[in-house]
Image: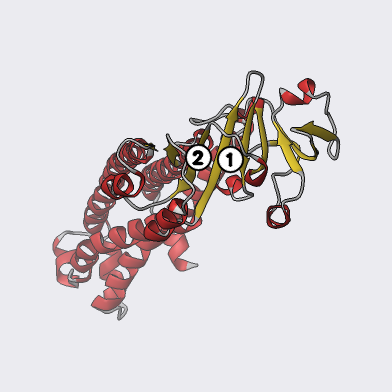
Amino acid sequence: MWLIKEVFYQRKRHYLTIIASCIAIVLVLLVNIISSFIIENVNLSFEQLGLNISCIQLLEKRNDNWIDSVIEIYDIRKYSSYKKIQGRDYKVIGCNSNLSKVFTFNFERGHFLTPTGNRYNDNQIVIGSKLKHYFNCYQLNDFINFNGITFQVVGILEKDNYNLYEDFDDCIFIFEGYVKDYTQSGLYFVSNKVFDESYISELLGEDNYFFIDQRQTKDSLIALLNLIRNVLLALSFVSVVVSIICIVNNSLSNIYSRMKEIGIKKALGASNEDIYRQFILESILIFLISIVISCLIVLAIIKLINLTTKNEVEIDFVSNIKYITLILIIASSCNIYPAKKASEITIIETIKNNEFS
């Protein structure tokens, strides 16, 4: 309690220091939170657009297990082979249930082809939003006849589902075992490994495949956003450094204005360690108060942003605690010199400065 009294009642100049520290800390936290939110949303947008998806499309039909070879060599976990029929009014895509792990589908109702159905080749079908009018099919579990086979509708996609590869609004998805006379075939997949096209060329034939890989576009833009984020964080940390310099300068100037206090405490038996500890604890308390106020301000700002923009900006507590801890350590370290300077003042020095007159 005595320390809080020292900060709030006897050292009113600390108010300005707390305000300056709050501004700097709020700036750091907001830059970190908002930039992380932007990068996360860009990543999500890339997934929805399919910029994280690669594709190998065969130009001539093959009956070997080339897909298994590619998956094994590059240890691909998210993938789906496909066979496509390009019709006049709609596209038929034969695939397996794993395609929902590769593409981002938004459903008006229902779900994608199920793994169980994939195993037993059930007559399941998923249709795009335009095709519910084409087939006059608006409910789940309705039936559609295609190539003499009756399929049960298990999913209807939302309107305006599309990405780099397909406009899903006019797509039919069924298990690839039903697709015989296809016009295109290939493999959609997501992988973090860099692909060696020479291997694919040797496996499939130089003029027998078309390879699409947009990951470089994604990686370049994410790298640019991370660079911008780091630059903004560095600039915001400059304001933190400036506020810390102000605190150190304030502490040094306080030494001379508080010589009478230091002299009285030493006359009453306070040691150099006691004075040193007091100044260190005061600086830590000032920054702890600044951090608490800053966190409350940031929470209020983020809540206001979410309400006004209808976004869901989330706070990553781990990364923010990391920055807060770093600021606190730097601030405490920088106040070691002023505290040491204060602890070395003697009673004789306070008398010479006429502090008792």
Judging by the rendered image, the residue that carries numbered circle 2 is 47
Label 1: few (<14), some (14–19) or many (≥20) C-alpha neighbours in 10 Å: some
Residue at mark 1 to residue at mark 2: CA–CA distance: 7 Å
- Give coordinates of residue 121: x percent, y percent: 72, 51
The front one of 177 and 143 is 177
- Give coordinates of residue 147: x percent, y percent: 74, 33
The front one of 71 and 229 is 71
Q: Looking at the image, how many numbered discs can be counted on the residues?
A: 2
SS for dot 2 = helix
Badge 2 amino acid: Glu
Seen in the picture, residue 346 relative to 104 is either above or below; the reply is: below
Classify residue 7 by image quadrant.
bottom left
Q: Are marks 1 and 2 in contact (CB under 8 Å)?
A: yes
Judging by the rendered image, the residue that carries numbered circle 1 is 104
Label 2: few (<14), some (14–19) or many (≥20) C-alpha neighbours in 10 Å: some
**Residue name at image x 30 percent, y 78 percent:** 270
